[in-house]
Amino acid sequence: MADSARNLPPDLDAEDCRIASPSSGKKKAQQSPGIRPKYQSSAPGHCLKRVTLTKPTFCHSCSDFIWGLVGFLCEVCNFMCHEKCLKTLRWACSCMTPSLVRVPVAHCFGPAGQKKRFCSVCRKLTEGNGALRCEVCELHVHADCAVFSCADCRSSHLDETLEQDTFHHHWREGNLPSVARCDVCRRSCGSSEVLSGMRCEWCGVTSHASCYLAVPPECTLGRLRCMTLHPDRVRLHFRNFSKMHCYRIAESCSQELDNSDDVDQTAAASKEGPETGKQLKVYDGDDAVKRGSFRLVSIMRATKNEEVVEAALRAFYLPDDPWDFELKEVSYTHRLHNEDILNRNGGTDNRGGSLKDGGDAWLLRAKLRDPEVIKVYTARPRSGAAVVSVSVSKESTAASVLSEVLRLLQRQEEDASSFSLMEVYMSSKQVQRQTLTPQEKIQDKLQEIRKVSLRQMNQTRFYLVEDRKSAVQVSLLIGGLTPLLNREEYVQLIQEQLSIKSESEPPLLT
């Protein structure tokens, strides 16, 4: 019982219970926060609050035991730490993971096995057969948490459009051996009780979450660098080339991952909420309504509508401002036929009434913003800033955004027609790229993505890509030639053999 208590988040007092489960319908529901003080940290994304501990608990930052009855818990990702570790906290919350990706690379998920591991999204222990493991970067997640992870796997080759000037460490948090030691302070950084510690998936260097920034940023691939083919030496020009083919990984878990964001509605419907309120089924877009994939949010007695919106954002791991979103009721007819819910609720502001007086199904929508700011990433950071912010209005097109980005990068002399704006969706199982047409309206594109799924919008980026036609060069090793000939004689010999073969056999391509 003592070991199992350490693997779970600490029990909190009734008035302090505000944390959500990553599994919709199978675990506890996300509860509205109420009016409670929040504590700031140097790590982005965390929503920390002071809680009273009733079980043995370990700090996720330093991996030490938390003595006393006071801890600080993140309401989004279940991160727990000492009060003294708040000042040295560096690792970001799970909701900020899409913003930290350098080069989007999809994961290769497979069965996790029976070893004791912790989920990198919700930080809870993975149990049973519902856990997944990336075959390349050792990312461990629950099956229902996989949709909230993004394409942050380690890159094994150079992309034809996205490049980087420095080969950085690929840090992965937690699931370290208990004997692991920090490369900076030489103290123990591994833990079998909680998700703590950092490890580079290339060179294997380990450190605390508060020490990893002190490690030199460039990775040297560790002791096996002489036996490892450097990713900078591999370039794939064919975009549809599967990463699983590159690593010879069987796609045995692909079907399971495709259905990982589906929710067991029977379990969710039978799950009763607290006696003082009720539970709401919250959808993040039309796609979730169509598939019946929802998250549970609990409403207390004196809960404001704005607080319920904040709890819904935390349930979907969205770090945005709650004032930019609203909840709209979904009727049974619209769920059955999947009609346009925005048009149905366009003339009514549902925030005016109480959510407790409405139904049990609600749709989380983003409010219309004009103008709004988007971030555009450069495909080659060496040529300027890595990301620039651009303000877009209803009349802004992809061509106007490209001109503004080039101006901010102080590259006005270059022809804007030689660049394109690329939309990149960084899903955990597949990175999808789409080049926008110059006349495409940016705000219409953003509203379309948000209407489909707010989670998809959080995992979508825009890149400035230069249109270049690179010639593919293939090197062949030819053996069995006559020795001691000069270069011209070898070229003539090979050309003669190729001409004979082309005359004797019909061409394969015309």
Image (cartoon, rainbow, N blue to C red):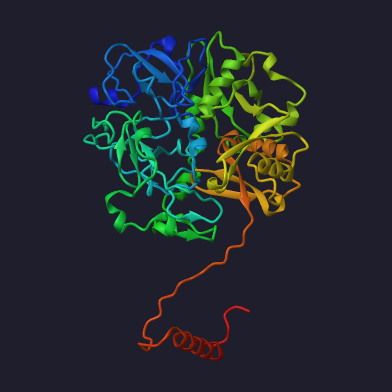
- Name the residue furthest left: 179
Which quadrant is the N terminus positioned in?
A: top left
Judge left or right: residue 96 versus residue 52: right
Residue at x-position 76% and y-position 35% = 394
**Residue 338 shows in this picture:** no
Q: Which quadrant would residue 21 be assigned to in this image?
A: top left
Judge left or right: residue 392 versus residue 62: right
**Residue 209 shows in this picture:** yes
Judge left or right: residue 187 versus residue 506: left
Of the pair 181 and 165, the residue shown nearer to us: 165
Of the pair 88 and 270, the residue shown nearer to us: 88
Residue at x-position 49% and y-position 88% = 492
Image spot of residue 486 (x, y percent)? 42, 86
Which quadrant is the C terminus positioned in?
A: bottom right
Of the pair 360 and 133, the residue shown nearer to us: 133
Image spot of residue 172 (x, y percent)? 37, 39
The vertical placement of 350 against 195, above or below, is above
The vertical placement of 508 against 299, above or below, is below
Residue at x-position 46% and y-position 18% = 40
Of the pair 498 and 383, the residue shown nearer to us: 383
Image spot of residue 319 (x, y percent)? 54, 27
The vertical placement of 279 against 333, above or below, is above
The vertical placement of 179 against 272, above or below, is below
